[in-house]
Image (cartoon, rainbow, N blue to C red):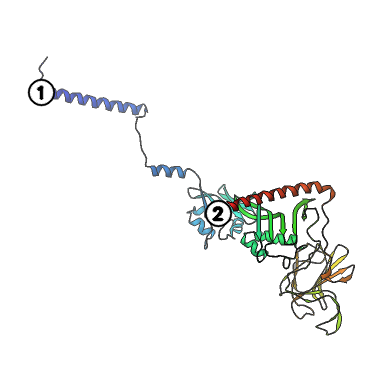
Amino acid sequence: MYNVPLKCQYALFFLLLVAVNVTICIAIQASHRDNTPINSTLTLPDNHIKQSQSQSRPLSIDLTVQPGDTLSSLLHNQNIDSKDMQRLFANHKILTKLSQLRIGDHLHLTLNHHLLLKLSHTLPDNKELNIIKHNNEFVTQTTTLPLISSTRYASAIIHTSLAAAAETQHIPAQILHQLEYIFKGTVNFSTQIRPNDKVEILYNEYFKNGLPYKPGEILLAELHLSHKTHGAVLFSFDHKHGYYTLSGHSVEPLFLRFPLHFKRISSRFSLHRLDPITHKIQPHFGVDLAAPTGTPIHSVGNGTIVFKGWETGYGNTIKIRYDKKYVALYAHMTRFAKVKRNEHVKKGQTIGYVGMTGWATGPHLHFGWYVNHVPVDPLKRKIMYNPPIPTFLRHAFTTTKNRLLTELTLFQSHQTHSSRA
């Protein structure tokens, strides 16, 4: 072994270190010339990654209109691009459709870097308005939203009144009105309802976007009164529908019993009445139904207006012909509804409003009823019903009835098990 001095050892180590550094530098320069990537990793902050990802995708925002909100304020709060705002508000068609925003309405926005790509708004008539950007302009598209129907069951035991029982059991007001309309030809809800009577109803409820939208029609109804049970089944044929008893007879009367909600009968049909205006004994060919001024007056059936105008004594008067046999006279109206002579009106349609025009001492409706041009006491009219189910449709009606009765039984059973649990 050669004995190398210490100073020489230090010198050799220094030269070796310089050689290694020069070799590394040459390798790095060569890699840059050959575009060969160097194995290195660059780590970005997490918030930077999330921001980049969110900006590369459209952003969806749901807004609910609150008190004091306007379309302008809602969009401004989302920092919508000013040019998009100008384009949107320059479109009068869009502004007209969005000018009636109500508290609770929903808007759905689709944005990209604060640029408005789409605005959707549900309209009251079950339609959806879509405002879409196309070539830097906004265009509108209106589509009808699909409604999903579901059968609902409701029941209530009456303690004080049908209306109170329905409210307690959260039966929709529209369904209660349908129930009263269906049975008003056979049941007097003012005098025939007793405590512990019961009502059971199957009806349609419509859903929109998974949320309750509105109640539909009653499918089956049963009134369990102390003396009798009344049933009604909805059955449709020939593009029309009606309610029928379980035996297939029509539940609905051909004519309404009364044309309005009145407080009392102020004068009855008479051939010898002392007229309060002329103070003479003379016939009173009708019945006077006292009600507040402005109370709506309804046509008692489907017919045609044959007279609309002023008649001495009767004031504002409308006469409606039903078939070829019956004519009804409605007098003393304060004003007419938007109807005209020779117009066809439907049963229950508003034709005017209670007043005291002509010879009258107070607001009331004079209701006259004529059969083959002969005056008849309206209070003694025989209740007539629509025709029963035709023979050739009996099988189809029975199938519909049995299906609904089966559904009713299932709902009743479920309710019984729930109450026991």
Q: Is residue 141 visible?
A: no
Which residue appears at 86% of the width and 71% of the height?
Answer: 376
Q: Position of residue 234 (x, y in %)?
A: 74, 53
How far is disc 1 from disc 2 in space, using C-alphas?
A: 86 Å
> What is the three-letter code of the residue carrying label 1?
Leu
Who is closer to the viewer here, 165 or 55? 165
Nearest to viewer (mark 1 / mark 2): 2
Q: Position of residue 230 (x, y in %)?
A: 75, 58
Instruction: Residue under label 1, please give it.
Output: 6
Does 312 sit left or right of 151 as displayed? right
Who is closer to the viewer here, 12 or 34? 12
Which badge, 1 or 2, comes first in the chain's sequence? 1
Q: Position of residue 287 (x, y in %)?
A: 81, 74
Who is closer to the viewer here, 6 or 32? 6
> What is the three-letter code of the residue carrying label 2?
Leu
Mark 2, Cα crowd under 10 Å, few <14 / some 14-19 / many 20+, is some
Q: Is residue 400 above or below residue 382?
A: above
Quarter of the figure that contains the N terminus: top left
Count how many numbered circles sit on residues in the image. Answer: 2
Does 261 sit left or right of 387 as displayed? left
Which residue appears at 68% of the width and 64% of the height?
Answer: 195
The kind of secondary structure element at disc 2 is strand
Instruction: Residue under label 2, please give it.
Output: 107
Q: Quadrant of residue 97?
A: bottom right
Who is closer to the viewer here, 261 or 16? 261
Considering every residue shown, the one lying at the far bottom of the view is 279
Q: Position of residue 22 (x, y in %)?
A: 24, 26
- Do the residues bearing badges 1 and 2 touch, measured as CB atoms within 8 Å? no
The kind of secondary structure element at disc 1 is helix
Q: Is residue 277 above or below residue 162?
A: below
